[in-house]
Structure formats: C-alpha cells, structure tokens
Image (cartoon, rainbow, N blue to C red):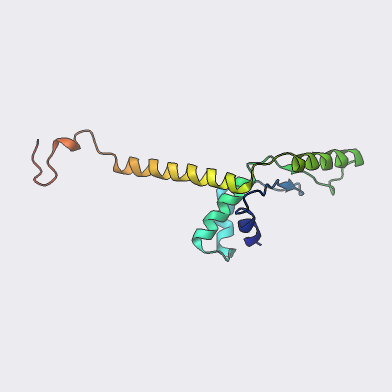
Amino acid sequence: GECWLLQTSQLPTCGLIPVIAEDNFLVPSPTLYEELRPTSLLDQQEFQRYCIVIKALFQEIAVVFVPQNYSSTHEDLLLRANQAAAKLQATLTPLAEKVKAIEARNGEERIAEIDKEVDPKEDDWKEDPLWGESL
C-alpha cells in the first residue's frame, strides 16, 4: 500500500488532495509514523521518504466527506462533493514539489543542528589546538 504514494510523489505534475471519510480520522503525526514503522515493508530510507510524502500530502487542506454520518443531508453531501471537485479542478502544487520543499527544509534544519553541535565556545580560539598553550 505504500509504494503507490512513493511513485506518485515522483510524478512532476501530479497533485493530490486528502479526503477524510471517517469521523475518527487523525492527521498523521510523528507518533503515527513510529506505529507504522514495524509493519512497513520499506527500507529505512524509503520509509523516511514515505513519511515526508504523507506530510506533504496533508499540507493541502483536506475535504471532509463522511456520507455515513447520520447528520449528513443530501445538500451537505452535495456541497462537500462540489468542494472536492473544485479543489481537483484548481491548480494544485504537485506533490513532488512539496516533497522537495520539505526535504530542503529538513536539510537546512539538520545543518543548523550540526552547526550547534560544532559551534566553538567563545574562548576555544584562544588556545593552540596542538600544544594546549594560550595564544
């Protein structure tokens, strides 16, 4: 079930919108990804990309369409169907672009983390690294 989403995320012109069809649906979170990992057939790198693709997909505002809900009237369902159709007819940002943007942001965040880890203390430059003597 994971491969189609990964394949779709590589198509340069494919845009997707999430459609929520259950009342108890929760938007994916890091906790969900941790729960999915043990059952995934993807290797670690593919699974990380899969999580990024899901995150990119849910950047688009979902259409809530729950026809089994007892309070859904014909008019309500028609309105929601029209909302979904309008979103599909609009120009969507391709999923591949969203994924690249998230990967770029994640890369910048990782570089910032590394910079913090390597950030020299204010007085480090005053000592000779080979002899330990003050300069």
Q: Is residue 28 visible?
A: no
Picture residue at 82% right of the left edge, 40% below the top: 80
Farthest-out residue, right: 74
The spot of residue 36 in percent (x, y) is 59, 58
Picture residue at 9% right of the left edge, 37% below the top: 134
Farthest-out residue, bottom: 41
Choose top left, top right, bottom left or bottom right for residue 86: top right
Choose top left, top right, bottom left or bottom right for residue 108: top left
> Would residue 79 be found to the left or right of residue 34 on screen?
right
> Would residue 90 be found to the left or right of residue 122 on screen?
right
For the C terminus, the image quarter is top left
Number of numbered discs present?
0
Picture residue at 13% right of the left edge, 38% below the top: 127
When the figure is inspected, residue 6 is found, relative to residue 58, above or below; the finding is below
Q: Is residue 130 visible?
A: yes
When the figure is inspected, residue 88 is found, relative to residue 40, above or below; the finding is above
The spot of residue 46 in percent (x, y) is 53, 59
For the N terminus, the image quarter is bottom right
> Would residue 114 be found to the left or right of residue 102 on screen?
left
Farthest-out residue, top: 122
Picture residue at 29% right of the left edge, 43% below the top: 118
The spot of residue 22 in percent (x, y) is 76, 49
The spot of residue 59 in percent (x, y) is 63, 41
